[in-house]
Image: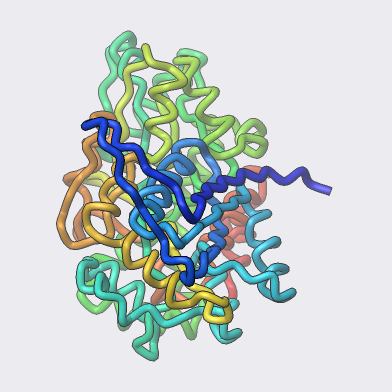
Amino acid sequence: MKIKQFVKVIITFSLFILCLGCQNNQSRNIIIPQDEETINLSFFGYKSEAINVVAIEETLQNYMKDHPHIQISYESVKGTDYYDILSKRLKNGSIDDIFMIDKEYLQKFKNSGYFEDLSDLSTISNFSQRSLEQMKDEDGQIYYVPSTISAFGLYCNLDLLKKHNQSIPQNEDEFMKVCQYFVDQGITPLVANNDISLKTIAIAKGLYPLYQEENYREIIEKMNNDSQILKDYMRPGYELVEKLIKNKFVDAKATLKTQKTQDDLTQFSKGENPFMLTGAWAAVRMEKMAPELKFEVHPYPILDNGSVLVTNIDTRLCVNAKGKHVEEAKKFIEYMTQTEEMWKFVDNQCSFSPLNNNQLSTNKAVQPLNKYLNDQQSILGSNQLIDYEMWTHTRSGVQLLLQGETVEAALELIKK
C-alpha cells in the first residue's frame, strides 16, 4: 500500500483568551458570549508543500482572530492519493465542510449533491470574466471558487546559458536549436517530470490554434460530440513531445520516475541543465534550494513566431452541501476571496489572481510570464467547456510516448 503523505495543520483558539498586541504592548480582550457555541470547520485539500501550508495557515489564523468562535482544521494529502481519499470520505459520510477539487472530479461528483451553490457570495463579482466563464455551470450555479491561477513555464538557467553563449529561446525554431546545441555538448537540455511537464507542452502546441478561432466555443461544442476533432488538434502537440524524446532533449527513462515539483527541482538546482519544465509556483522553492542559481521562468517557446503561456484555474474551493455548517463555511470562503486576502495567498505562491484587479506576480523570477497573461498569448490547460478529461488523457498519452509508444497510441486514449 502506498505511503500517503499527510500534512495536518490544526490551529485552535480557546473560548476565553486574551490576545496580546505585539506592536503597542496593549492587550485586546476577545470575549465570546457563554451561550455562543464554538463551531469546528474541517478543510481538506491537496496543497501540502510547506509554502502552500504556510499561506493557508496565515489565512486561517487571520480569519479566526476576527471570528474567535470558529475553529478551522486543515488536513492535506499530496498527489493523486488525495482524490482516492476524498472519494471515500464523501461516500462514507466523513464530511469535510470545505474541500479542494479539480475540473475532472467536479464533473464526476457534480450530481451527488456534495456541492453547495456559491453564486450568492458577495465576492463573486470580483472574479475576472475568464474565471467566471469557468466557474459557472450550465445551470448558472457556481459550485466552486478558484483561489489561484497557476502557470506552467520554461525555467531557464541564466548562468549556464551565458557560459555557453546561448540565449533564452523565443520561438520553436530557437528552442530546437538551443536544445540541440546542448545535446551536442553532452548535456540533457530539459529537466522534466512525469506529470505536468510534457503534457502542458503538448496541450499548448495542440490547443493554441483552437483558442485563436473566433468561434472556438462552437468548435468545442462539436468536439464534445466527436473525439476525432480533439485528436486532430492534439496531434501536433504529441508530435512535438515525440520529437523532444527522440532528439534526446529529455531523458525519457529519468522523466518517467521524476516526481513533479520535487525530483525535478532537485535536479535543476544542481545547475547542470539549461532548462526545466514545471509549475511557476515552484520558483520560491527553487530560490530556497539554490540561492546562488540565477534563473527565470518563461512561457513555452513552441510557436512559429512566439511563445504561449499555459495556465489553470486552480485550487478550487468547494463547500460541502451535506456538511453541518454550510453557512459558516461559505462565510470563510467569502473572506478568503476578498481582494486583499486572496492577493496575499496568491503572491506568496508565485501564482496569479483569478480576480479582475489585474495584479501580477511580484516575484522577479516569474515576471517574464506577466505580459503573457491575456487571452491572446495564454491558454487554459484544463477548460470547463471541454468535456474530456484532458489532464488525465494527456498525462497517460505522454507516459506512452516516454515508453516508446507511437503518437497514434497516445491519441487513442482520448475518449469520454
- Give above or below for 280 relative to 408: above
Q: Quadrant of residue 278?
A: top left
Q: Position of residue 407 (x, y in %)?
A: 57, 55
Q: From where the camera sits, is residue 205 visible?
A: no
The quadrant of the image that shows the C terminus is bottom right
- Give above or below for 77 relative to 389: above
Q: Position of residue 56 (x, y in %)?
A: 43, 48
The residue positioned 61% from the left and 46% from the top of the image is 8
Q: Position of residue 118 (x, y in %)?
A: 38, 78
Q: From where the camera sits, is residue 191 visible?
A: yes
The residue positioned 15% from the left and 57% from the top of the image is 357
Left or right of residue 60: residue 296: left
Q: Quadrant of residue 402?
A: top right
The residue closer to the viewer here, 57 or 384, is 57
Q: Position of residue 311 (x, y in %)?
A: 35, 54
Q: Residue furthest bottom?
A: 139
The residue positioned 33% from the left and 11% from the top of the image is 164
Q: Quadrant of residue 25?
A: top left
Left or right of residue 67: residue 199: right
The residue closer to the viewer here, 294 or 303, is 294
Left or right of residue 258: residue 222: left
